[in-house]
C-alpha cells in the first residue's frame, strides 16, 4: 500500500425528506445562487422543497446548465455573481450541474487572465465560494469530491480539474428525488459509477485488501441493483443503494494507497468533445477494449475481478479473464447502452483526430504505469469500432 493523505470534508446528509435540512446548512444571511439544469427539478417536486426549506432567504436563480457544462455559459454565472454580490452556491441536479458550479466557485475570484486556465493548465486558485449540493442524478460522485470536468463550446475540449477548496460543504442525497429519472439517465449513472470503480481497482496488486473489498462491494451492489431498479423504479431501497454506491465510487477512499488507470475517461472525454456522445456511453465503449488490450499487465487484478465480482471459477485463468471482460460488456448492453463506436456512426477515419486531441491535452502517456502511448490509444480506439 502506498502512502496517502485522506481528507474529505463534505458533510453527507442522506435519506428521505432531507432537503428540509438546507436551512440548517446555509446561513440565512448568505445571498444564495440556486443553480440547476433544464428544469426537471420543477416537475419532480425538488424545486418546491428547496424553496420551502429556504423561505425568507435571498435567492437568485441560474438555470440551464446542460450536460457537459460549457465554459461560456458558466462565465455568465460568474458575471451574475459579481453583479449581485452572491456569496453561496447551491447546485441542484446531477454531475454536470455540480461540476459547473465548482468551476464557477473557483472562477469568481480567479486572479489570472482567463479562468479557463484553471481547467486547461491547472492554474492555482487561492479561494472559492462555498458550495452545497442537492443530488438528483447519481453518477459522477461530484457531490463528495473536489474534482470537475468542464467543456468549451468554442473548441473540442473536455477537461478535468480539481482543488481541495472545491469540496462541497454539504451534499443532500434523498433517493426519492431519483424516482422519476428516465431509463437512459439511470443506466448512464450506473455505468459511470461502475467504471469509476474499475479505474481505481483494475490496475495491479498494491496489497490493499480493504480497498479491493470496498471496490468489489460497490461493483456487486451496482450489478445486483441494476435490473431491480428498472423493474421497480420507485423502490426506495434500490434507489438508496444506487445513490450511495455512486457517491462512494468516487469520494477518494478507493484510490487511497492504490494505483489508478483513468485511460477510459481520457479517451471517453475526447469522444464526447468531438461527437457529443453521453459521457457514460463513451466509457462503456472504451473500457472492455482497454481491459482486453492490457490484459497481461492487469492479469492479477482481472483474475480477481473475474472470481470475486463475476464468480467465475471454472476454466483456465485466461479463460476466466476473457469471460469477465465479456460479461462486463454484456452488463452495459443489458442497460441499453451500445458498446461499439460503429453503432454511433463513428468509423476509423475519426481516430487520427482523437489521437491529436489526446496529444494536445498531454495524454500521450496514460495508464497506471504510464505506458499507454498515443499509438496504444489508437489501437484501443480501433478495437472499439
Image (cartoon, rainbow, N blue to C red):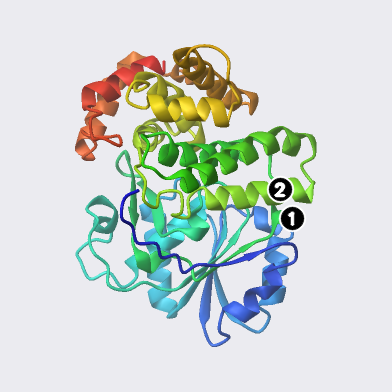
Q: In this view, does 185 lie above or below 48?
A: above
Residue for badge 2: 239
**Closest to the observer, 78 or 133:** 133
Calculate the distance from the C-alpha at mark 1 to the C-alpha at mark 2.
Answer: 8 Å
**Closest to the observer, 17 or 89:** 17
> Within 10 Å of the Cα at label 2, are there few (<14), some (14-19), or many (20+) other Cα atoms?
many
Tag on residue 290? none
Q: x%, y% of residue 347?
A: 38, 15
**Residues at badges 1 and 2 in contact (C-beta under 8 Å)?**
yes
**Closest to the observer, 308 or 34:** 308
Q: Earlier in the sequence, mark 1 or mark 2?
A: 1
> Within 10 Å of the Cα at label 1, are there few (<14), some (14-19), or many (20+) other Cα atoms?
some
Quick one: quadrant of the C terminus? top left
Q: What element carries label 2?
A: helix
Residue 187 picture quarter:
top right
The structure residue drawn at horizontal position 49% and vertical position 48%, both measured from the top left corner, is 210
The structure residue drawn at horizontal position 70% and vertical position 73%, both measured from the top left corner, is 20
Residue lying farthest bottom? 29
User: In the visual, does 317 lie left or right of 357?
Assistant: right
Q: x%, y% of residue 374?
A: 22, 26
Report the label total.
2
Q: x%, y% of residue 304?
A: 48, 29
Q: What element carries label 1?
A: helix
In this rendering, which labeled residue sits more in front, label 1 or label 2? 2
Question: From this viewpoint, is residue 43 visible?
Answer: no
Question: From this viewpoint, is residue 276 visible?
Answer: yes
Tag on residue 176? 1
Residue 367 picture quarter:
top left
User: In the visual, does 23 lie left or right of 291?
Assistant: right
Q: In this view, does 279 lie above or below 339?
A: below
Q: x%, y% of residue 215?
A: 52, 43
The structure residue drawn at horizontal position 37% and vertical position 27%, both measured from the top left corner, is 298
Amino acid at each position: 500500500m502506498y502512502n496517502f493523505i485522506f481528507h474529505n470534508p463534505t458533510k453527507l446528509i442522506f435519506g428521505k425528506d432531507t432537503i428540509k435540512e438546507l436551512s440548517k446548512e446555509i446561513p440565512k444571511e448568505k445571498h444564495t445562487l440556486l443553480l440547476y439544469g433544464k428544469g426537471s427539478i420543477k416537475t419532480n417536486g425538488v424545486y418546491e422543497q428547496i424553496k420551502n426549506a429556504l423561505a425568507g432567504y435571498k435567492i437568485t436563480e441560474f438555470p440551464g446548465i446542460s450536460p457537459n457544462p460549457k465554459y461560456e455559459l458558466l462565465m455568465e454565472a460568474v458575471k451574475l455573481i459579481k453583479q449581485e454580490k452572491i456569496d453561496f452556491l447551491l447546485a441542484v441536479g446531477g454531475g454536470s450541474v455540480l461540476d459547473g458550479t465548482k468551476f464557477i466557485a473557483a472562477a469568481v475570484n480567479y486572479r489570472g487572465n482567463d479562468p479557463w486556465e484553471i481547467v486547461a493548465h491547472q492554474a492555482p486558485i487561492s479561494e472559492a465560494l462555498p458550495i452545497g449540493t442537492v443530488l438528483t442524478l447519481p453518477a459522477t460522485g461530484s457531490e463528495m469530491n473536489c474534482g470537475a470536468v468542464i467543456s468549451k463550446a468554442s473548441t473540442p475540449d473536455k477537461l478535468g480539474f480539481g482543488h481541495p477548496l472545491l469540496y462541497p460543504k454539504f451534499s443532500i442525497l434523498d433517493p426519492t428525488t431519483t424516482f422519476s429519472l428516465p431509463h437512459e439517465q439511470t443506466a448512464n449513472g450506473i455505468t459511470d459509477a461502475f467504471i469509476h470503480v474499475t479505474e481505481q481497482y483494475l490496475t495491479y496488486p498494491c496489497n490493499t485488501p480493504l480497498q479491493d473489498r470496498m471496490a468489489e462491494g460497490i461493483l456487486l451492489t451496482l450489478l445486483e441493483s441494476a435490473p431491480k431498479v428498472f423493474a421497480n423504479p420507485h423502490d426506495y431501497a434500490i434507489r438508496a443503494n444506487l445513490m450511495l454506491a455512486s457517491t462512494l465510487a468516487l469520494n477518494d477512499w478507493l484510490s487511497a494507497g492504490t494505483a489508478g488507470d483513468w485511460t477510459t475517461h481520457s479517451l471517453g472525454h475526447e469522444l464526447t468533445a468531438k461527437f457529443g456522445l453521453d459521457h457514460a456511453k463513451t466509457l462503456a465503449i472504451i473500457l472492455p477494449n482497454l481491459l482486453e488490450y492490457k490484459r497481461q499487465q492487469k492479469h492479477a487484478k482481472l483474475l480477481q475481478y473475474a472470481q470475486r465480482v463475476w464468480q467465475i471459477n471454472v476454466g483456465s485463468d485466461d479463460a476466466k479473464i476473457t469471460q469477465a471482460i465479456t460479461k462486463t460488456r454484456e452488463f452495459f448492453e443489458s442497460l441499453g447502452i451500445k458498446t461499439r463506436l460503429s453503432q454511433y456512426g463513428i468509423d476509423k477515419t475519426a481516430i487520427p483526430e482523437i489521437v491529436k486531441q489526446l496529444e494536445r491535452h498531454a495524454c500521450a502517456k496514460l495508464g497506471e504505469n504510464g505506458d499507454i502511448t498515443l499509438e496504444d490509444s489508437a489501437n484501443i480506439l480501433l478495437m472499439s469500432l
